[in-house]
Image (cartoon, rainbow, N blue to C red):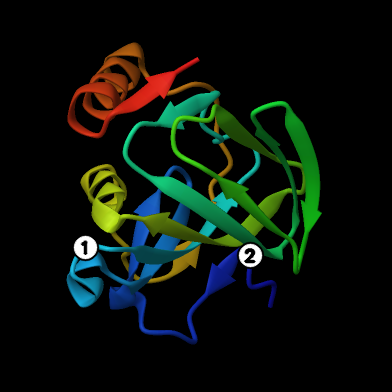
Amino acid sequence: MNNFQTTTATNISDYRNYQGGYFKTLISPEQTNGTMALVDMTLPKGVEPPPHCHTNEDETFYVLEGAMTFRVGEKTVEARAGDSVFAPRMVPHEFIINSTTARFLTVITPGKFLEYFMEFSFPAAEELSIVPPQGPPPPAIITHMTKQLSEKYGVLFI
């Protein structure tokens, strides 16, 4: 069984569905007095965020499975399993998933931005699955998400 498509040999209640994929919080901000969060995320190609920068957080990505391209400032990094990329706050960045899916760890410092992922996800149901995008989200959802990201979480879109 391909772990990217369906996984049942895990505690499903630990996972949340997000953007056609899923994630699990490995370390929450509550465990670190807000200093960081560690998230294990699996996403399909095509759901990547547009170029943006965080005013409050640094992000570190560690690729576990798949292939991704990261653009951080003026640098472009082709990353595969075992590669890590640092995206400091106030530096524009984006990533592109080059494989069908990618699984990666994200370290968020400080950890408050995990609240965004919690707000825009929902508890996983009976099994974990990957659902590639069937087109862009409805405009109302994009508007709401963009407004929350900029006003509540200090994310600036480039």
Q: Name the foreground residue: 101 vs 85.
A: 85
Q: Which mark is residue 95?
A: none
Mark 1 or mark 2, whichever is nearer to me:
1
Image quarter hosting the N terminus: bottom right
Instruction: Name the residue located 35 percent from the left edge and 76 percent from the top edge.
Output: 12
Residue 104 as seen in the image, left or right of residue 154: right
Mark 2 sits on what residue? 4
Q: Are marks 1 and 2 in contact (CB under 8 Å)?
A: no
Mark 1 sits on what residue? 34
Q: Kindly tell me whether residue 122 is visible in this rendering.
A: no
Q: Residues within 10 Å of mark 2 (few under 14, many from 20)?
A: some
Instruction: Describe the element under mark 1 as helix, strand or loop.
Output: loop
Amino acid carrying label 2: it is Phe
Q: Residues within 10 Å of mark 1 (few under 14, many from 20)?
A: some
Q: Quadrant of residue 133?
A: top right
- Earlier in the chain: of badge 1 and badge 2, it is 2
